[in-house]
Image: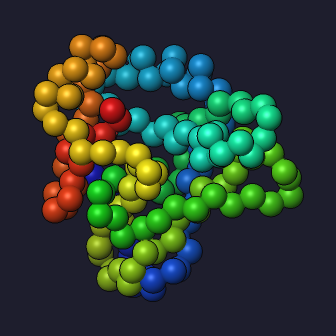
């Protein structure tokens, strides 16, 4: 599974890059998602970090799609024990529907190491059994992706 490796040593806390892509509505993301075959990667990043915080009255569902226009960060794979963290950054506007997604090193990372981040937020993404993956497949019509991160506390499936 191709991913992204750093070309130089990184220090814990160091800024790496931002996630870039087209900002599209979630309806358009759903349309694009339906066109993906099972073996195609998806490059969607939901702008949902403030959705349930009561931070604003009107939430609009946007998604950043790195497929056609993006930065190297779109190749960063998921790990359940990642070496990068992602933070939201806003400036010059007060719209919490859209923000920058900035990657930072969670630890010292040696040159050549694969960069990873957790595709889930801290409070989501419980481990999923094969039986639960079967149920999700029956309900939603697509099978969650088997997680290949190999970490000890792997949650086993992505996109549940
Ligand atoms: C943003 S892309 C990451 C880069 C991608 N691996 C590539 O080769 O272009 C996200 C896709 O990578 C795959 N992926 C990322 N992390 C994974 C993991 N831990 N286990 C299995 N597949 C993963 C999934 O297919 C997912 O849709």
- Seen from the viewer's position, the closer of residues 57 and 2 is 57
Residue at point 70%, 51% (across, down):
99
Q: Residue at x 51, y 17 (%)?
A: 31
The image shows residue 97 at horizontal and vertical percentages of 72, 41
Quarter occupied by the C terminus = top left
Q: Is residue 157 left or right of residue 62?
A: left
Q: Is residue 83 visible?
A: yes
Q: What residue sits 51% from the left and 80% below the top?
A: 13
Residue 42 occupies quadrant? top left
Q: Nearer the viewer, residue 81 or 7?
A: 81
Residue 17: image quadrant is bottom right
Question: Is 47 left, or right, of 145 in this rendering?
Answer: right
The mark total stands at: 0
As drawn, which residue projects farthest toward the left? 130
Residue 69 visible, this angle:
no
Residue that sits furthest to the front in the current view? 54
Q: Position of residue 121 (x, y in %)?
A: 46, 51
In the displayed structure, 30 sits above or below 42; it is: above
In the rendering, at what x and y percent does residue 37 appear? Answer: 31, 22
Please tell me which residue lies in front, 26 or 32: 26
Tell me residue 144's x, y (percent). 27, 30
Say if 149 sits above or below 127 in the image: below
Left or right: residue 51 compared with residue 14: right
User: Is 159 above or below relative to 117?
Assistant: above
Q: Residue at x 24, y 45 (%)?
A: 127
- In the shown orientation, is residue 73 left or right of residue 37? right
Q: How is the image coloured?
A: rainbow
């Amino acid at each position: 599974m191709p991913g992204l490796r750093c070309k130089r040593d990184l220090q814990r806390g160091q800024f790496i890059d931002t996630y870039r892509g087209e900002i599209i509505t979630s309806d358009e993301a759903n349309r694009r998602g339906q066109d993906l075959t099972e073996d195609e990667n998806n490059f969607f990043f939901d702008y949902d970090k403030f959705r349930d915080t009561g931070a604003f009255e009107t939430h609009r569902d946007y998604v950043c799609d790195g497929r056609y226009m993006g930065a190297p960060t779109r190749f960063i794979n998921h790990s359940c024990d990642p070496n990068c963290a992602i933070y939201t950054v806003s400036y010059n506007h007060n719209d919490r529907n859209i923000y920058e997604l900035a990657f930072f090193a969670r630890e010292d990372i040696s040159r050549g190491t694969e960069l990873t981040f957790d595709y889930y937020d801290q409070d989501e993404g419980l481990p999923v059994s094969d039986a639960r993956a079967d149920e999700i497949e029956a309900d939603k019509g697509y099978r969650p992706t088997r997680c290949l991160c190999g970490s000890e506390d792997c949650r086993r499936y992505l996109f549940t």
